[in-house]
Amino acid sequence: PGYLDCKVFGSRGGLAVCGFFWVQHFMLKGKRVIVTGASTGIGEQMAYHLARMGAHVLVTARTEAKLQKVCTKHTCTGQSYVTLCPANGPQSCPAEPPMLFKTWTHTHRGLDMLILNHIGNSYFNYFDGDVGHVQKLLKINFLSYVAMTVSALPRLKDSGGSIVVVSSMAGKAGFPFTAPYSATKFALDGFFSSLRQELIIQKVDVSITLCILGFIDTAASDVVLVSPAPKEECALEIIKGGALRQREIYYKYAATKIPLLIRDWAPELLDYLIRRSYNVENLKKN
C-alpha cells in the first residue's frame, strides 16, 4: 500500500509525504534504537514517537528519575522500553558506552539506530574565559559522541544501521553568547562528516545523518527574538531523516538552510542578521 501511495504523487512534496507515512507506520516497527539525552526536550519527544512507531527503545540520560517518568508515560504502554543510567551517565563518561551496548545487544541481539542527542549544561552569555568549562563541554557534547559511536559501530555494521547526530545551526555558523557550545557542535560536524566519507570508501553500510536545528522551544528566552519551533515536530523530523538515511536534515528548513546559503555568499550580512536576532539589553538584565 505504501508503494502505491507513492505513485499517486508526482512531485517532490508528494514523495516527502509518502516517505513520512512510510517511516511512521512501517519502517521503524521492531527496530532497535538507542536515544541519548532522552529525559527531557527533543530526546523525550523522540522516545514517545519511536514508541508509537513500534520500535524497541533504550533511553539514556544522567537523571534516572526523569527517565522513569518518560518510560511510564501512557504513550509508551506496551512498547519495549529499557532504562539504563550509570552513575555519571554514559554520555558524560566515555568509559561507559561499551557496557551499555553489551547490555542492550545481549537482550535485543543487535542495534539498528543510534541517536546521539545529549548535551552538557552551558551558559548563554559573553564568553567568560573559562577554558575548563570548554573542556568539560567538549567531553560531554563531542568526545562521548565519538566514544559511543566507536562502541556502536560493530553492531550497526551487522545490521546496516544508522547514526543520527543532533547538532545545531551553532555548528555551522558563528552565533554570539554560545562560544563553548558552538565549538562542540562544529567538532561534531567535522568528525562525523569525515567518518561518513571513510565508511563510504570502505563500503560499510552505516549511514550518518547530521541534524541542523534552529531555535527550538526547549527553553524560554527573552533574548532571542526568533519564534521557537515545536520540539514535537522537530523530534519527528529527526527520526524521519535517520530512517530515510539522509545526509543532513534542516529544521525548520527555511530558517536554517537559507541563512547557510547567505553565509556562503555574504558572510558579513549573515553575521549582521544574526546579531539583529538578539535583544542584548535583556541579556544584560539576566
Image: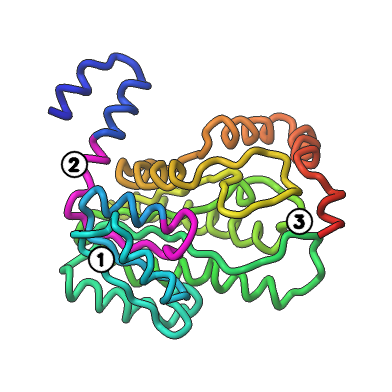
Which residue is at a point 54% across and 65% down the rendered structure image? Answer: 119
CA gap, disc 3 and disc 1: 37 Å
Considering the image in quadrants, where does the C terminus appear? bottom right
- Residue at disc 3, secondary structure: loop
Residue 75: image location, x then y, percent? 29, 54
Residue 41: image location, x then y, percent? 49, 56
Residue for badge 3: 177
CA gap, disc 3 and disc 2: 42 Å
Which residue is at a point 77% across and 40% down the rendered structure image? Answer: 271
Chain part drawn in magenta: 22-44
Mark 2 neighbour class, 10 Å CA radius: few under 14, some 14 to 19, many 20 or more: few
Q: Amino acid at mark 3?
A: Phe
Q: Is residue 186 left or right of residue 234?
A: right
* 259 vs 153, nearest the viewer: 259
Reading the chain from its start, which is encountered first: label 3 or label 1? Answer: 1
* 201 vs 260, nearest the viewer: 260
Considering the image in quadrants, where does the N terminus appear? top left
Residue for badge 1: 81
Furthest residue to the front? 74
Mark 3 neighbour class, 10 Å CA radius: few under 14, some 14 to 19, many 20 or more: some
Residue 39: image location, x then y, percent? 44, 65
User: Which is more foreground, mark 3 or mark 1?
Assistant: 1
Residue 43 among those drawn in magenta: yes
